[in-house]
Image (tube, grey):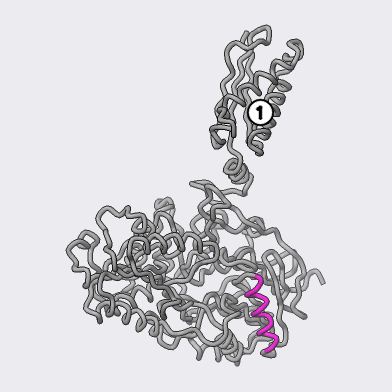
C-alpha cells in the first residue's frame, strides 16, 4: 500500500486567507512523490507587523523536497500569485514557467540582482508542457490583469483543472474572453478535480463586464467640470486601457502618476497591449493641461502611504496640484485590512474640496473573480468529480463548498493550508499534513517573527524602551551617576515629575539596597536594576517597559 501511486494537493498559502497563494501537486508513492508548484505569492504586512513589508509563505516543506520539484507555474502577475518569486525561487531553483507579461514584470522589478536573473520559460495557452508525471496545458481566462491562465494538469490518475483567478467576461477590454470551448472539451475528456477560486462565492449572479465599467467611467469623465483622477490597481492594464479610451471619447488627455503604474504600462507597451490608445501625457506637462481636459490615472487605491494618491491627499506632490471641485474616482475594491487607510485619504481629499466617487456611486469597478452563477457555469463546463474550494477566507470557502454540493458535484473536499489532500485513488480525503506558515521580508532580509525581531518590535511599540548604564569602581560603589535613557515612555508622571528622574531614583535604590559584598555578582545587580526600573515605571504609568541594563566594574 505504501508503494501505491497517489495524486495529492497541498496548499501552503491562500486557502483560508486572501493572498499569499502557493499550491503544490504531488504524484507518486507517499515517500517518493514528484511535485509541481502553482503560484508563489505574497501578502502585505500591516501595522501589527512593524518593520515588515511583505508576508511570504513558509516553503520549508518543498525546500526539503526540492530535488523532486519538477517545475513552478505562475498563473498570472498579481502580487498575491507571483510576488514571492524573486525572494523564494533562489531557494528552489526549479524551472519557472510564466506568461510574457508576467516575465516582463519580473524583469521590471527593481529589487533584485540583475546579474543573476531568473530564467523564465514561456507559458502560452494551448501549448502543453510535460514535467515528470504531469502534463500542463494553460487555458486563457479573463481576469483583471493581462494573460491570466487556468491550468489543466494531466496525470496518470486523472485530470485536474486549477482555475487560478478568473471570471466570465464576454467583452474584456484587453485580451480574449475565458475559453469556454476548451473548458467544455476538457470536461468531455473527464475532470477528476476542479481546484477553484472562491473569492466571490458569497455573491449572487454574474460579475458585470469591463465594458460596462468603461461606460460608467466615460459618463463620469464627460460630466466632470474639472480634472478627473482615477485610482486603480497598477496591474489592471485592461482598466487603464478602459479609462484611456473613455477619456479619449470625452476629448481629454491622460497622464499616469506613480512608478508602479509606469512600470506596468511600459511592459504592456512592449507587448503591444496598448497600441490602440493615444500616448500618455508626460508628468511635467501637467501644469499646461487645461483642467477640463485632464484625466490622471494614479496609484494608491489601497491607501498606501507612499503612493501618489496619498501624497496628493497630503498636498506633498511638488509639480502636481488639484483644485477644489476636481473629481477623484476609486476604481477598485478595498483589500481587507486597508479600509482605514483608504478612508483617511478620502476624508483628506473631501476636506480639500474634492469630489470623491466610489463603486457605491456608480459602476466604476468590477471584480476579476467569479460570482455564484459563473461558478455554476464552470461546474457545467468541466463536470468535475471533486470540487476543492481555494483562494479565500473561511467564509468564502464554506460558501463555495455549499454551492458545489447544491450543484450536485459528487465530492466536495474542504482543505486548509498545510493539509495534504489525496485526490486519487479512492475518495478525496486529508491523509497528512505539512509544515506551513508565514515568513517576513524586512528590508533585505527574510525570516520568521523571532528571527526578524518583529515580536520585540511590536512590544516596543506598546511599552517603549529604557537603557541604563551603571559604572562601579573596584569597591563596587558608583563611579558616576548612572545613565538612564527612556524612549517611547511618557515624559512626565501625573504629578509633573520627569519620568527619567523617577527611573534614575529606581536605579540608585536598587544598587544601594544590595550589600557591597554581594555586588560582585554583576548579573544579580543587572537583574535587580531591571526589575526596579520596570516596577517604578509600572507604578506611575501602569505599563512595564522593555529595560536593557549594562553594569560594568572598572578596576
In the picture, the quarter occupied by the C terminus is: top right
Image coords of residue 152 (percent x, y): 57, 80
**Residue 211 drawn above or below residue 316:** below
Q: Residue at x 67, y 59 (%)?
A: 436
- In the image, which residues are magenta? 394-406
- Which residue is most to the left? 288
Quadrant in the rendering for residue 292 = bottom left
Image coords of residue 271 (percent x, y): 33, 72
* Front-lying residue, 362 or 141: 362
Magenta stretch holds residue 396: yes
* Front-lying residue, 523 or 529: 529
Q: Is residue 290 visible?
A: yes
Magenta stretch holds residue 388: no
- Which residue is most to the right? 1
Magenta residues: mostly which secondary structure?
helix
Quadrant in the rendering for residue 199 = bottom right
Q: Which residue is mark 1?
A: 533
Q: Residue at x 58, y 67 (%)?
A: 18
Q: Residue at x 62, y 23 (%)?
A: 550
- Which residue is most to the front? 495
Q: Is residue 35 visible?
A: no
**Residue 100 drawn above or below residue 119:** below
Q: Residue at x 80, y 69 (%)?
A: 2
* Front-lying residue, 420 or 361: 361
Amino acid at each position: 500500500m505504501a508503494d501505491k501511486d497517489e495524486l495529492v494537493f497541498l496548499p501552503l498559502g491562500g486557502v483560508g486567507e486572501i493572498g499569499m497563494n502557493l499550491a503544490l501537486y504531488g504524484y507518486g508513492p507517499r515517500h517518493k512523490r514528484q511535485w509541481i508548484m502553482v503560484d508563489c505569492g505574497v501578502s502585505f504586512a500591516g501595522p501589527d507587523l512593524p518593520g515588515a513589508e511583505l508576508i511570504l509563505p513558509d516553503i520549508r516543506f518543498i525546500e526539503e523536497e526540492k530535488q523532486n520539484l519538477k517545475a513552478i507555474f505562475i498563473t498570472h502577475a498579481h502580487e498575491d500569485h507571483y510576488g514571492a518569486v524573486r525572494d523564494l525561487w533562489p531557494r528552489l531553483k526549479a524551472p519557472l514557467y510564466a506568461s510574457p507579461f508576467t516575465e516582463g514584470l519580473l524583469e521590471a522589478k527593481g529589487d533584485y540582482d540583475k546579474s543573476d536573473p531568473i530564467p523564465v520559460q514561456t507559458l502560452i495557452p494551448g501549448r502543453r508542457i510535460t514535467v515528470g508525471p504531469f502534463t500542463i496545458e494553460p487555458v486563457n481566462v479573463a481576469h483583471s490583469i493581462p494573460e491570466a491562465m487556468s491550468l489543466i494538469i494531466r496525470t496518470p490518475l486523472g485530470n485536474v483543472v486549477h482555475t487560478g483567478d478568473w471570471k466570465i467576461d464576454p467583452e474584456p477590454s484587453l485580451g480574449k474572453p475565458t475559453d469556454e470551448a476548451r473548458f467544455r472539451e476538457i470536461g468531455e475528456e473527464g475532470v477528476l478535480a476542479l481546484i477553484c477560486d472562491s473569492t466571490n462565492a458569497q455573491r449572487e449572479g454574474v460579475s458585470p463586464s469591463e465594458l460596462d465599467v468603461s461606460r460608467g467611467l466615460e459618463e463620469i469623465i464627460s460630466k466632470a467640470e474639472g480634472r478627473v483622477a482615477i485610482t486603480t490597481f497598477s496591474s489592471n492594464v485592461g482598466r487603464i486601457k478602459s479609462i484611456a479610451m473613455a477619456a479619449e471619447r470625452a476629448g481629454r488627455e491622460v497622464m499616469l502618476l506613480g512608478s508602479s503604474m509606469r512600470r506596468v504600462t511600459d511592459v504592456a507597451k512592449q507587448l503591444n497591449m496598448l497600441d490602440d490608445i493615444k500616448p500618455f501625457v508626460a508628468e511635467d506637462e501637467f501644469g499646461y493641461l487645461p483642467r477640463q481636459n485632464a484625466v490622471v490615472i494614479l496609484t494608491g487605491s489601497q491607501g498606501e502611504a507612499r503612493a501618489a494618491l496619498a501624497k496628493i491627499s497630503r498636498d506633498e506632490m511638488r509639480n502636481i496640484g488639484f483644485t477644489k471641485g476636481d473629481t477623484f474616482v476609486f476604481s477598485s475594491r478595498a483589500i481587507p485590512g486597508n479600509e482605514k487607510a483608504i478612508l483617511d485619504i478620502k476624508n483628506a481629499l473631501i476636506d480639500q474640496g474634492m469630489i470623491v466617487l466610489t463603486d457605491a456611486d456608480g459602476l466604476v469597478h468590477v471584480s476579476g473573480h467569479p460570482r455564484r452563477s459563473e461558478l455554476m457555469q464552470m461546474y457545467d463546463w468541466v463536470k468535475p468529480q471533486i470540487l476543492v474550494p481555494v483562494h479565500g477566507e473561511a467564509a468564502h470557502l464554506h460558501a463555495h463548498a455549499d454551492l458545489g454540493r447544491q450543484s450536485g458535484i459528487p465530492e466536495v473536499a474542504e482543505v486548509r493550508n498545510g493539509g495534504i489532500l489525496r485526490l486519487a485513488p479512492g475518495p478525496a480525503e486529508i491523509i497528512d499534513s505539512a509544515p506551513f506558515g508565514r515568513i517576513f521580508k524586512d528590508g533585505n532580509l527574510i525570516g520568521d517573527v523571532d528571527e526578524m525581531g518583529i515580536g520585540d518590535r511590536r512590544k516596543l511599540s506598546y511599552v517603549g524602551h529604557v537603557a541604563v548604564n551603571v559604572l562601579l569602581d573596584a569597591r563596587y560603589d558608583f563611579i558616576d551617576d548612572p545613565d538612564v535613557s527612556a524612549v517611547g515612555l511618557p515624559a512626565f508622571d501625573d504629578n509633573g515629575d520627569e519620568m527619567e528622574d523617577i527611573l534614575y531614583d529606581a536605579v540608585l535604590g536598587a544598587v544601594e539596597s544590595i550589600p557591597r559584598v554581594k555586588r560582585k555578582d554583576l548579573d544579580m545587580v543587572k537583574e535587580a536594576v531591571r526589575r526596579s526600573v520596570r516596577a517604578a515605571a509600572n507604578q506611575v504609568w501602569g505599563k512595564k517597559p522593555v529595560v536593557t541594563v549594562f553594569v560594568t566594574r572598572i578596576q
